Amino acid sequence: MLSFLIFSMLLNSMGVIILQLSEKISYKGLGVLESFKDIPMAIVSLFCVNLIAKTGNKNALIFSLIFILVSCIALPLVDAFWFFKIWLSIVGVSFALAKISVFSIIKNNFQDKQLASSISSVDASFMIGIFFVNIGFGSLLTSSFSEYWKFGFWVIAVLSIINILMLKPLKIDEIKISNTEKKSGEWKFFLNLKIIYFFVIVFFMVFVEQSFNSWLPSFFRNNLKLNSYFALQASAFLALFSFFGRLINSRLILRFHWFKLVLICLFTVFTILAICQIIISNFYLDYKFLLIFLMPLIGLFLAPLFPLYNAEVLNKVPKEKTHLLISIVMICSSLGSSVGSLYMAGVFHKNLSNFYPIFILFPLLIIFGLTFFLNKTTITYDRNQQE
């Protein structure tokens, strides 16, 4: 949970970076910046599976935290835009190692509804990390030390040290795969329809989350004319509601079927987005203050979706396939994040941000349709493939 909190603060500092650099760099240029994180993340996710299998999940997680520790110390000391690209590449590579490791640890130690509950709890810490990074940097940017805002990343470096010291003595049950050579039919398993639907859903889920987490502060500043501090606080409350959404979901999944929870969440998100668009289009001057409360509230119902989809498929996949599954999830996530950021950069560049809720609604409708197919299909697994 602490590992996910740390990486959450790093990955979601993009909202802060976009706000701080938007006066010097165009939105079009900032939209491309996200790719420096996502493309290395996708590449490493594909090729680090065997490495993690050999070294073990705990060691891979510790390595990723060491990379983060060094990069966060260096960031404030290099005053150049190009270093943000290198730093984001390091963040992407490290998160790829960390996520595959963490989810594999969960898969090896939990099963069924307990697995779903554990994933929701860990993902909840991811959302509280977004809250902390927005509150922390928002406070720093409005203080007399605002010019030193990049030194806020040293706090994340300290948390990384604490996390490494906590992980070192731990004994974690894990399955080390000794034979990491590719077997015939290894990839054929992932051509199952249910898994393909899942990968497409992952792409669009991260697409939507990226549109909120990185671009909501810019929407509040550009359209609601809030200053940087209040724009970040609105985004922080989106993360806070998301944290409670995932925390509540970690309990509800023990009692209710995942499909029912997904439908309730999606219908509620659709309703809130529709209300927000109606206010923007027809009652903007009179009720724009409602948007400050309504849009962050979406996190309460949007955030539980990703853990629910993850748990549904991860429960059905054999342990020996976990590393490879999560690596492909990371690739889909990376692509979704990059495309989502480019998508929103285009919306803001073309001055179409008045239709911000509508542009978010489109990918959610695709997710809604694919959810029915995901629920009705099953995963078939031929164990003889491994023999």
Image (cartoon, rainbow, N blue to C red):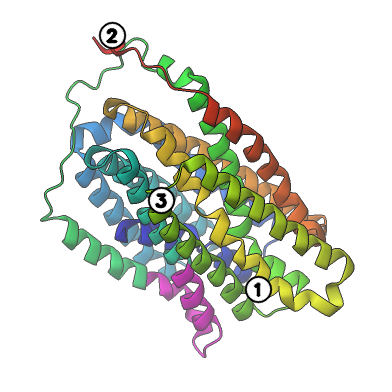
Choose between 308 and 36: the one closer to the eye.
308
User: At label 2, which amino acid type do we have?
Assistant: Asn
Between discs 3 and 2, the one toward the N terminus: 3
| 210 left or right, relative to 53 | right
Q: Which residue is mark 1?
A: 293
Q: Residue at x 73, y 44 (%)?
A: 362
Q: Please name the residue that numbered disc 2 is placed on.
A: 384
Magenta range is: 131-154
Indicate which disc residue 90 carries.
3
Q: Residue 337's spot in the image, x, y percent?
A: 57, 46
170 or 341: nearer the eye? 170
* Residue drawn at (70%, 52%) of the image: 270
Closer to viewer: mark 3 or mark 2: 2
Distance (Cα) linking label 1 and label 2: 54 Å
Identity, as a three-letter code, of the amino acid under mark 3: Ile
Residue at the spot 67% in from the left edge and 68% down from the top edge:
294
Question: Residue 72 appears at what percent x and percent y?
Answer: 37, 64
Q: Quadrant of the N terminus?
A: bottom left
Q: State whether residue 355 is above or below residue 172.
A: below
